[in-house]
Image: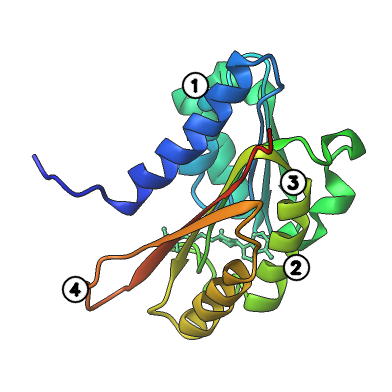
Amino acid sequence: MRHLDDLMPLSRRALGSALSLAAGSGIPPLAVDATAGNGHDTLFLAGAVGEKGYVWTFDVQETALAATRKRLADNAPELLSRVSLVHAGHETAATHLPAATAGHLRAVTFNLGYLPGGDKRLVTRAATTLEALAFFAAALGCGGVISVHAYLGHEGGEEEGGEVARWFADLPWETWRVAEYAFRNKQWNRETLFLAEKLKIW
Ligand code: SAH
């Protein structure tokens, strides 16, 4: 047994907590996977949103969406009906999410970089990542969580991670908490997890 959490379980605990609190308060648990990739996060979110919830999943690669659909079909086909697979960049989310979701998203997750085994040219990029973050930060309900897992090792990764870090640093303390987690001694494939919570103002 290890005593320090890896980044993925940390992210899932925060996202899952925001979704189950919403469900328990009668608020529709609405979630977004901004980067479908191989579908691991979509499968997690589709379970975590529960029966009353819904997940929108974005990817620019048809192969990523096909892998995600297959992961759902193989592992939990009953969850397919609460997931929309959107073949578009997350920066276009405003045109794909129903207008009624504005201000009501509870959990949004990004897994940056490129799809392992996929087309490495279709990597996430700082400009579009920040555009999507700005949209989702506004569309998040109070008590919602945004998780961004950034990889720094590939070309452009350091720049993207730095821009994401600066963008999060500017969110006001009165209405947001932003944490950054990383293993200080990881020398290769360096990665950083940003977790941001939009505060409930009582
Ligand atoms: N680095 C992670 C996997 C990241 S997968 C790991 O090692 O596990 C990132 C996914 O984001 C890829 O499937 C890619 O196609 C997708 N992507 C790239 N640009 C995007 C965009 N603008 N909008 C949505 N998805 C995008």
Disc 2 target residue? 131
Mark 1 — residue? 76
Colouring of the image = rainbow
How far apart are the two marked residues, 2 and 1, measured between alpha carbons? 32 Å
Q: Earlier in the sequence, mark 3 or mark 2?
A: 3
SS category of the residue bearing label 1: loop
Q: Nearer the viewer, mark 3 or mark 2?
A: 2
As measured in the structure, the alpha-carbon distance from the residue carrying label 3 to the one carrying label 1 is 19 Å
Nearest to the eye among marks 1 and 4: give it.
Answer: 4
**Tags 4 and 3 touching, CB below 8 Å:** no
Going from N to C along the chain, the mark reached first, 2 or 4, is 2
Inspect the image, locate mark 4, and give the three-letter code of the amino acid beneath it: Asn
Q: Which residue is mark 4?
A: 185
Query: Amino acid type of disc 1?
Result: Ala
Q: Position of residue 127 (x, y in %)?
A: 70, 77
Q: Measured from the top left, where is residue 158 in percent x and y? A: 46, 82
Q: Nearer the viewer, residue 36 or 7?
A: 7
Three-letter amino acid code of the residue under disc 2: Glu
Q: Name the foreground residue: 102 vs 51.
A: 102
In space, the residues marked 4 and 3 are separated at their CA atoms by 37 Å
Q: How many marks?
A: 4
Measured as percent of width and height from the top left, residue 176 is found at 61, 53
Judge from the rendering whether residue 49 lies leftward or rightward of residue 52; answer left or right.
Answer: left
Q: Please say if the residues under marks 3 and 2 sit with CB atoms less than 8 Å apart.
A: no
The residue tagged 3 is: 86
Whole-angstrom CA distance, mark 2 to mark 4, is 31 Å
